[in-house]
Image (cartoon, rainbow, N blue to C red):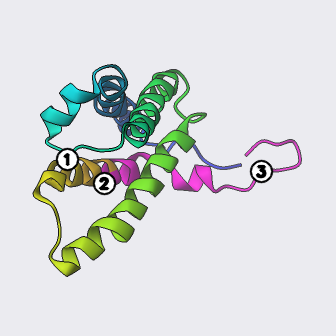
Amino acid sequence: MTEISNIRWGWLRFMYIYTIIIAGLMGLGIVIVPEVVKNMIKVPIQEPIFFGIVGSVYLSFGLLSILGLRSPLKFVPVLLLQLCYKLIWLIGVILPLLIRGQFPKYALMSLIIFITYIIGDIIAIPFSYVFAKENETGRI
C-alpha cells in the first residue's frame, strides 16, 4: 500500500486554486471576450478557431480544478496533463526560439506564468502515488 501521508495537500490545493484563477479566468475571457484578451496580453492577431480552442482548454482546466479542490487525488491527472503540455511547450517551442534568437517579447509573460506552473506542479503532484502499482482489488 502506498503511503499517502507524505502528500503535500496544501500545494495540491494551491495549484488547483492557481489554475482556477489564472487558466480558468483566462479561458473564460478568451471564449467570451477574445478581442479584450488579445489586447490585454498583446498577442498578434490569431485565427479565431485555434485561439478559441486554447481558451476552451484553459477554461476546462479551471473547471476541473474546482473538482480537484473537493477530491485532490482523484484530479491529480489534471495537474499532470498541465505539467506535461507546459514542459513540451517550453522544450519544443520556446527553447528553439530562444536558441535562434527569435523569442517574441509578447511571449515573456506566458513563459513566466508557465514556469510558475511547472515548478508548482512538480512540487504538488504526488508522483509516488500517481505511479504506484495497483493491487488486484484496484487499490493502491
Residue 126 spot, x, y in % from top left:
50, 49
Where residue 99 is drawn, which disc sits there? Answer: none
Residue under circle 1? 44
| Image point (89%, 48%), residue name | 136
- Name the spot of residue 34 as percent of width and height, x first: 28, 28
Determine whether the residue tagged by mark 3 lies in a helix, strand or loop.
Answer: loop
Amino acid type of the residue that numbered disc 2 sits on in the rendered structure: Ile
Q: Earlier in the sequence, mark 1 or mark 3?
A: 1
Looking at the picture, tell me which residue is in the foreground, 133 or 62: 62
Label 3 packing within 10 angstroms: few (<14), some (14-19), many (20+): few
Give the percent coordinates (x, y) of residue 112: 19, 52
Specify the label residue 119 is tagged with: 2
Q: Which residue is mark 3?
A: 134
Upstream in sequence: badge 2 or badge 1: 1
Q: Residue at x 71, y 49 (%)?
A: 1
Element type at marker 2?
Answer: helix
Tell me, yes or no, whether the two marked residues, 2 and 1, touch with CB atoms within 8 Å. no
